[in-house]
Amino acid sequence: MFSTTRGIVLHTNPYNDTYSIVHIYTELYGRSSYLVARRHKRKTRISNAHFMPLSILEMEVEHHKTREIQRMKEVRIDFPLTCIHAHPIKNTITLFLAEILYRIIQTKEADPKLFEYIYHSIRHLEILDQGIANFHLVFMIHLTRHLGIYPNAESHNTPGSFFDLLNGVFLTHIPDHPHYLNKEESIIFSRLLRMNYENMALYAFSRKDRTMIVQHILSYYRLHAIDFPEIKSHAVMQSLFD
């Protein structure tokens, strides 16, 4: 039986000469994988152009919990990402964030709040004209809220504190493990915790500071998420802002 759900494209990889597997975060079924033909007939309603990273889709799918690869009958674009695909910085950001989401979201259960956060974040990036360079920083830190690993922001006003990456808190002393930020890094990180999509254009970071923030957020993910690997597109992101 087919049902309709919205989905956000995370990653596509070839299965064989004929098919690809598309990994999609769906509204109804969590993370799901679909077998899609790499070459399509003229009359088909499915095109490879639908499966760009972070594309927002409306899909008609057949879903079985016991099946690893699901079936997709029809698909259409729910919200066109015209500006994102034409804008080199926005496009690189979507590649980077899509890889992060592909690696960190493993659940096959629906999470409406997480889906809505990602969905509305992508729509916001599409129309964004200020603060673009800070978008991925804000997205990454607020994603931790939905993953259940958001830092303890209540402790970040203490002057001269150290951010403990392992426990997600600010301390007045150096912790007894190596996973922490020094005082200068902690001040910059505390600024990030005050940022959101509405005010992020008001914050300016140097290239060095922005690179440092990304590296530490990725380290934070590795400490708190299971099997979170190195992000290959990180180097591309870093060179973009050099």
Image (cartoon, rainbow, N blue to C red):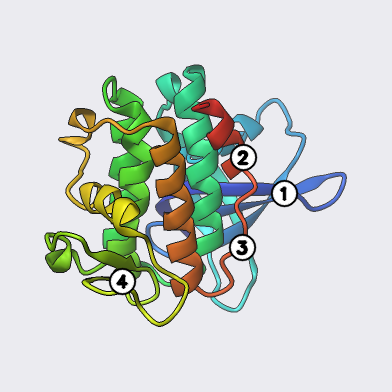
Residue denoted by label 3? 229
Task: Report the Cα–Cα distance between label 2 and label 3.
Answer: 14 Å
- Earlier in the chain: of badge 1 and badge 2, it is 1
Instruction: Give residue 179's position: percent from left, percent from top.
Output: 45, 70
Instruction: Give left or right: position of 96 versus 80.
Output: right
Q: Please tell me how crowded label 2 is: few (under 14), some (14-19), or many (20+) other residues with Cα within 10 Å.
A: few
The residue under the point 28% across, 47% down is: 188
Task: Report the Cα–Cα distance between label 2 and label 4.
Answer: 25 Å
Residue denoted by label 1? 13
Q: Kindly identify the amino acid type of the residue bearing the numbered disc 4.
A: Gly
Q: How many marks?
A: 4
Task: Report the Cα–Cα distance between label 3 and label 1.
Answer: 17 Å
The relative height of residue 144 versus residue 174 in the rendered view (above or below) is: above
Q: Kindly identify the amino acid type of the residue bearing the numbered disc 2.
A: Ala
Task: Report the Cα–Cα distance between label 4 and label 3.
Answer: 20 Å
Residue denoted by label 2? 235
The residue under the point 56% across, 60% down is: 103
- Earlier in the chain: of badge 1 and badge 4, it is 1
Q: Secondary structure at mark 2?
A: helix
Q: Is residue 205 visible?
A: yes
Q: Kindly identify the amino acid type of the residue bearing the numbered disc 3.
A: Pro
Q: Which mark is residue 168?
A: 4
